[in-house]
Image: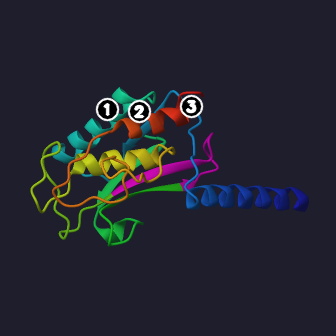
């Protein structure tokens, strides 16, 4: 029995360190089902403006790439959350982030979370890509974080790409050919 327990601990340690190292070096992760990545809201109070923009962002990725993103009500691959900095795990100096974490109870051994910082210091626009000079585009930031959470995209050096590392207030970005090709390259052959 002791031998089985030690093997199980070693398996979990390898699993956790493998996921952490893949995330740390920006290597691509993949979902268990290449035709379908599910997502849902976690710790989300109803807000039609936020929901519309997040859903539109998932729909945009699905329209222009080979990945099928489907909203479900529970047990999703990607959970979308929003709230003040102290509720998230991204820190107070970021507007949003996507995080991978080990979950040995799922078929693919990891899950992802997208989190939006709603602290008052960050102002978000209320429509699709129409931020004022002092607002962040919810849609553009959601597009960027979905790229990370899909497990396939790292930051781009192309400042026009949705996967460029930073956003400024007043910026509105959409998918570029580079973004689309990067996503398709990760999933098209599977």
Above or below: residue 161 compared with residue 99: above
Residue shown at the point (84%, 57%) measured from the top left: 7
Question: Which residue matches tag 3?
Answer: 33
Residue 42 in view (yes/no): no
- Please name whichever residue, 126 or 170, is drawn nearer the observer in this view of the structure: 170
Instruction: Give whichever of discs 3 and 2 has the lower sequence position.
Output: 3
Q: Are marks 3 and 1 in contact (CB under 8 Å)?
A: no
- Please name whichever residue, 100 or 177, is drawn nearer the observer in this view of the structure: 177
Instruction: Give whichever of discs 1 and 2 has the lower sequence position.
Output: 1
Instruction: Give whichever of discs 3 and 1 has the lower sequence position.
Output: 3
Real-space Cα distance between discs 1 and 2?
Answer: 7 Å
* Residue 110 covered by magenta stretch: yes
Question: Which residue matches tag 2?
Answer: 69
Q: Residues within 10 Å of mark 2 (few under 14, many from 20)?
A: many
| Place of residue 110 in the rendered image (x, y in percent of width and height, measured from the top left) | 58, 49
| Place of residue 87 in the rendered image (x, y in percent of width and height, measured from the top left) | 35, 67
- In the picture, measured across the screen, residue 119 lies left or right of residue 98, that is left
What's drawn in magenta, residue-wise? 101-115
Real-space Cα distance between discs 3 and 1?
Answer: 18 Å
Q: Secondary structure at mark 1?
A: helix
Colour treatment of the image:
rainbow
Q: Residues within 10 Å of mark 1 (few under 14, many from 20)?
A: some
The quarter of the picture where residue 120 lies is: bottom left
The quarter of the picture where residue 166 lies is: bottom left
| Place of residue 43 in the rendered image (x, y in percent of width and height, measured from the top left) | 34, 54
- In the picture, measured across the screen, residue 98 lies left or right of residue 173, that is right
Question: Which residue matches tag 1?
Answer: 59
Q: Residue lying farthest left?
A: 132
Q: Secondary structure at mark 2?
A: strand
Q: Residues within 10 Å of mark 3 (few under 14, many from 20)?
A: few
Residue shown at the point (61%, 55%) measured from the top left: 22
């Amino acid at each position: 029995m002791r031998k089985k327990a030690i093997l199980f601990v070693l398996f979990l340690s390898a699993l956790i360190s493998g996921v952490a190292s893949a995330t740390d070096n920006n290597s691509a992760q993949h979902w268990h089902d290449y035709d379908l990545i599910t997502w849902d809201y976690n710790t989300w109070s109803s807000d039609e403006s936020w929901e519309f923009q997040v859903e539109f962002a998932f729909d945009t990725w699905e329209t222009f790439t080979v990945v099928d993103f489907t909203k479900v009500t529970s047990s999703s691959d990607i959970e979308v959350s929003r709230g003040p900095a102290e509720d998230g795990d991204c820190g107070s100096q970021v507007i949003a982030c996507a995080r991978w974490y080990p979950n040995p109870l799922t078929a693919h051994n990891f899950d992802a979370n997208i989190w939006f910082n709603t602290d008052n210091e960050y102002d978000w626009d209320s429509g699709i890509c129409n931020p004022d000079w002092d607002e962040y585009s919810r849609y553009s930031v959601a597009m960027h974080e979905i790229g990370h959470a899909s497990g396939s995209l790292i930051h781009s050096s192309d400042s026009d790409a949705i996967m460029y590392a930073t956003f400024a207030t007043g910026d509105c970005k959409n998918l570029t050919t580079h973004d689309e090709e990067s996503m398709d390259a990760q999933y098209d052959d599977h």
